[in-house]
Image (tube, grey):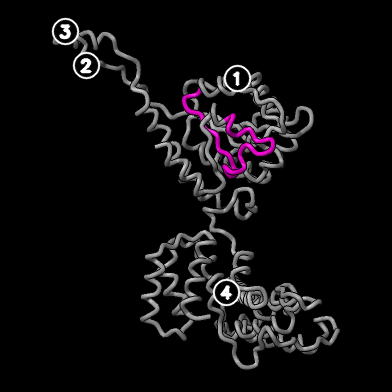
């Protein structure tokens, strides 16, 4: 592969992974290459990062793809993807003399902190232990299990703490934990490089690179992702509250002040050329959230509750309700500081969300909400419904939904499905969309776009 092909493929892979890379930025990277020694791989990485990466959160995706498209050159004796690994002795790793010798080498590398040496060692270890039993693929697990770097921690600590003037134990433990993590990442990088040689760089990149946090589909978020999303949601919640307040100021000028209007018309012969309005009473809007908690929206419901937490600080009152085929208030389960996953588990156990089948029934859920909590929606309320609008071909209770939308100051529906999937199967997205303004919302980027639309 020529350097030009490698460059264009790398930029295309970054875009596919969700990183915003413009044509101009790609050209900036090409100009930067003209001032570099192309043999200096880390200098090449730095130049590409400086010209193509806009946010620190994008750096992990960038580094992973860079390692695939610009792999490190193999040193002598480090093996390659085409060579057969050395035969195994058949002994358990703890009894294999070769494994013990390699663990001794790893100990010395971790002790010295030789990063280049650890990368070379990782390549040799993958060549020796990374092949699957059938020889068809590569895995990190076999390497990490054979080397068991974590079990070297006690010996490493003893080596540095026994020296006069050695490090404090906490600092030493943190240092070695970082070095072990770097070694494990080097193993993962080498495994991906070898898979890419077998199956192609493009395919490997698409299979292994996770999208940036702001483009991560809520329905695929893990518990660790939810912790990061929680930090990102708070500024969006502040913007959402300010946008709604701004719409209140601009969209409603208050009631007509008849007396002032008539008094002003005396100067124009009784013709009311200028109308006067009573000033509005400033207030922070109230928010009511209705969230689909069925299995099809469970991950999206996790995000919904993160958003609820963040919005509680921005509104006078936030009341949250969940539904499957019945509706129950869940505000009490999500006090500030509560773990979202634990709150979801408690809600599943205690909340009355199932009426008959436990399958989504939007019509009955809205009917239950109207009967039990219909008075919570007032002219000061902003109504936010979150769900995929899939009602298993049941009733939709459109008159109730229309009355809710007309009573509320604002009403919006966020749908985690792609618009191309709306109205397919049992989806009633467009039917509900005719009553309440519906927006696609699958990730933080689209949530931000929704907030901007409110302006």
Which of the two discs, 3 and 4, sits closer to the camera? Answer: 4
Please tell me the numbered disc located at residue 399. 1
Which of the two discs, 2 and 1, sits closer to the camera? Answer: 1
Which of the two discs, 1 and 3, sits closer to the camera? Answer: 1
> Residue beneath label 3, please?
266
- Compare marks 2 and 1 and give the one earlier in the sequence: 2
Q: Secondary structure at mark 1?
A: helix
Distance Cα–Cα, label 4 vs label 2:
69 Å
At 59% from the left and 24% from the top, the residue drawn is 401
For residue 273, above or below residue 195? above
Q: Residue 5, image x and y in percent?
A: 49, 76
> Residue beneath label 4, please?
68
Range of magenta residues: 408-432
Q: Is residue 109 magenta?
A: no
Q: Residue 118, image x and y in percent?
A: 61, 83
For residue 179, above or below residue 406? below
Q: Residue furthest right?
A: 90
Please tell me the numbered disc located at residue 274. 2
């Amino acid at each position: 592969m020529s350097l030009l092909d490698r460059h264009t493929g790398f930029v295309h892979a970054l875009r596919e992974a969700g990183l915003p890379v413009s044509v101009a930025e790609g050209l900036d990277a090409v100009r930067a290459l003209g001032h570099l020694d192309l043999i200096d791989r880390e200098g090449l990485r730095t130049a590409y990062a400086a010209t193509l990466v806009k946010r620190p959160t994008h750096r992990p995706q960038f580094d992973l793809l860079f390692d695939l498209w610009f792999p490190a050159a193999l040193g002598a004796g480090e093996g390659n993807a085409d060579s057969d690994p050395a035969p195994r002795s058949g002994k358990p790793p703890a009894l294999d003399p070769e494994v013990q010798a390699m663990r001794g080498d790893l100990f010395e590398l971790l002790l010295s902190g030789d990063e280049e040496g650890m990368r070379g060692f990782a390549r040799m270890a993958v060549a020796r232990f990374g092949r699957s039993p059938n020889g068809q693929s590569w895995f990190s697990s076999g390497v990490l299990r054979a080397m068991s770097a974590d079990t070297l921690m006690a010996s490493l600590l003893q080596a540095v703490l026994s020296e006069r003037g050695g490090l404090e134990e906490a600092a030493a433990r943190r240092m070695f934990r970082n070095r072990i993590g770097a070694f494990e990442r080097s193993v993962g990088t080498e495994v991906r490089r070898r898979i890419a040689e077998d199956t192609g760089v493009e395919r490997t990149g698409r299979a292994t690179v996770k999208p940036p946090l702001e483009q991560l589909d809520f329905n695929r978020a893990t518990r660790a992702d939810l912790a990061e999303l929680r930090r990102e949601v708070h500024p969006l919640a502040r913007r959402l509250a300010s946008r709604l307040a701004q719409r209140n100021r601009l969209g409603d000028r208050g009631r007509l002040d008849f007396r002032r209007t008539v008094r002003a018309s005396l100067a124009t012969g009784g013709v009311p050329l200028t109308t006067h309005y009573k000033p509005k009473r400033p207030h922070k809007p109230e928010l009511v959230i209705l969230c689909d908690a069925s299995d099809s929206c469970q991950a999206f419901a996790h995000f919904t509750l993160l958003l609820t937490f963040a919005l509680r600080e921005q509104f006078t009152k936030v009341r949250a309700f969940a539904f499957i085929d019945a509706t129950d208030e869940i505000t009490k389960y999500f006090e500030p500081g509560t773990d979202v996953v634990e709150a979801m588990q408690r809600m599943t156990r205690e909340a009355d969300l199932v009426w008959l089948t436990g399958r989504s029934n939007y019509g009955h859920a809205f009917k239950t909400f109207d009967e039990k909590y219909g008075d919570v929606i007032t002219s000061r309320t902003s109504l936010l419904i979150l769900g995929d609008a899939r009602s298993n071909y049941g009733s939709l209770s459109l008159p109730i939904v229309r009355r809710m939308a007309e009573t509320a100051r604002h009403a919006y529906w966020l749908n985690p499905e792609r618009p191309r999937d709306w109205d397919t199967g049992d989806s009633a997205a467009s039917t509900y969309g005719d009553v309440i303004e519906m927006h696609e919302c699958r990730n933080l980027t689209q949530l931000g776009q929704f907030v901007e639309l409110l302006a």
